[in-house]
Amino acid sequence: ACPYKPQSVNVALVGCDTYEETQKVLLSAKKDLGEILSAFEFFDTEALELLLSKDKNAVDPLGTKCRFYLLIETSGSDSSHDKEKVNNFLEKILSAGHIKDGTIAQDESQASSIWYLREHITEALKKTGYNYKYDITLPSPNFYDIVEQIRKRLSPDLAKVVGYGHMADGNMHLNIVSPTKSDQVLSQIEPFVYEYCATNKGSISAEHGIGLFKIEALKYSKPSAMIQVMRTLKQTLDPNGILNPYKVIPTHD
């Protein structure tokens, strides 16, 4: 049977001035919202500014410029209980100085407008230029540091660098966009991104998998012995190579 649609959904957007504050908000959300916390999304001011410049339907509901933005959603079955928990949570993080500004959707239309910001960043990037996309996971201390490290390696005239993703899962969508495809830009990104993930106990691929494009980068997340075991199992179960061919497993060391 399909799961029931939540009877009570609350969506809030808050802004923080430091990365450390976003982590404090996340910890508070996990503690104070608990079982009703259904989404905790992150995007930086560069991502929002790019979206606002490319999409006339995108509107900043805060009006106060912040360094980082957090979209927080709860889903439950008791509207009065959930609303009280959300309001208490927002009052707590505001009084503690963890957020600079914030708003909570009053109806489905406002909730959709807030989600629109997070969900249309990718489209705005496509309208800007050539995209280099990295779907990675990193521990909390390094989650945003990778974005700043890439910015140091690329001058603003070469590329724009934005970060957004599923913060509660440690899943960062690192996106670099340049006017056109550039070997110069790519050389400053790879293999640095993969090496950074390996050094900091992250993963080169989170929700989007290895597929075709990251086969040669698998070695940064899996030791050679593990890859050889994967290759042996693949050859044993699929000797003709007809199941999902050419993907995930390198054909050579």
Image (tube, rainbow, N blue to C red):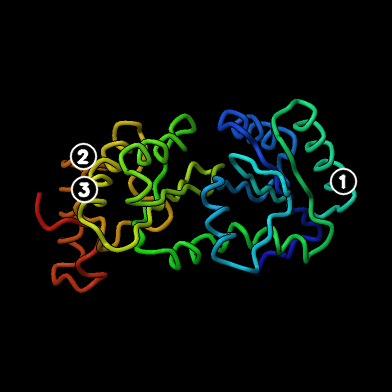
Q: Which numbered disc, 1 or 3, marks the residue that appears first in the sequence?
A: 1
Q: Position of residue 203 (x, y in %)?
A: 35, 43
What residue is shown with label 1?
Answer: 81
Instruction: Kindly state the secondary structure of the residue where label 1 is placed.
Output: helix
Residue ranking furthest to the right: 80
Q: From the viewer's perspective, is residue 131 above or below residue 37? A: below
Query: Which of the pair 244/187 is nearer the observer?
Result: 187
Q: Are marks 2 and 3 in contact (CB under 8 Å)?
A: no
Q: Which numbered disc, 2 or 3, marks the residue that appears first in the sequence?
A: 3
Q: Position of residue 209 (x, y in %)?
A: 35, 57
Instruction: Kindly state the secondary structure of the residue where label 2 is placed.
Output: loop
Instruction: Specify the quadrant that holds the N terminus.
Output: bottom right
| Mark 3 neighbour class, 10 Å CA radius: few under 14, some 14 to 19, many 20 or more | few
Q: Quadrant of residue 2?
A: bottom right
Q: Position of residue 229 (x, y in %)?
A: 18, 48
**Left or right: where does residue 170 sit relative to residue 230?**
right
What residue is shown with label 2?
Answer: 223
- Between circles 1 and 3, the one closer to the viewer is 3
Q: Which numbered disc, 1 or 2, marks the residue that appears first in the sequence?
A: 1
Q: Are marks 1 and 2 in contact (CB under 8 Å)?
A: no
> What's the distance in space between the residues labelled 2 and 3, CA to CA?
24 Å
- Between circles 2 and 3, the one closer to the viewer is 3
Could you tell me the amino acid type at mark 2? Pro
Q: From the viewer's perspective, is residue 158 above or below residue 241? A: above
> What's the distance in space between the residues labelled 1 and 2, CA to CA?
48 Å
Query: Which of the pair 232/200 is nearer the observer?
Result: 200
Query: Which of the pair 172/5 is nearer the observer?
Result: 172
Q: Position of residue 98 (x, y in %)?
A: 69, 30
- Residue at screen point 24% across, 58% down: 182
What residue is shown with label 3?
Answer: 187
Q: From the viewer's perspective, is residue 128 above or below residue 18? A: below
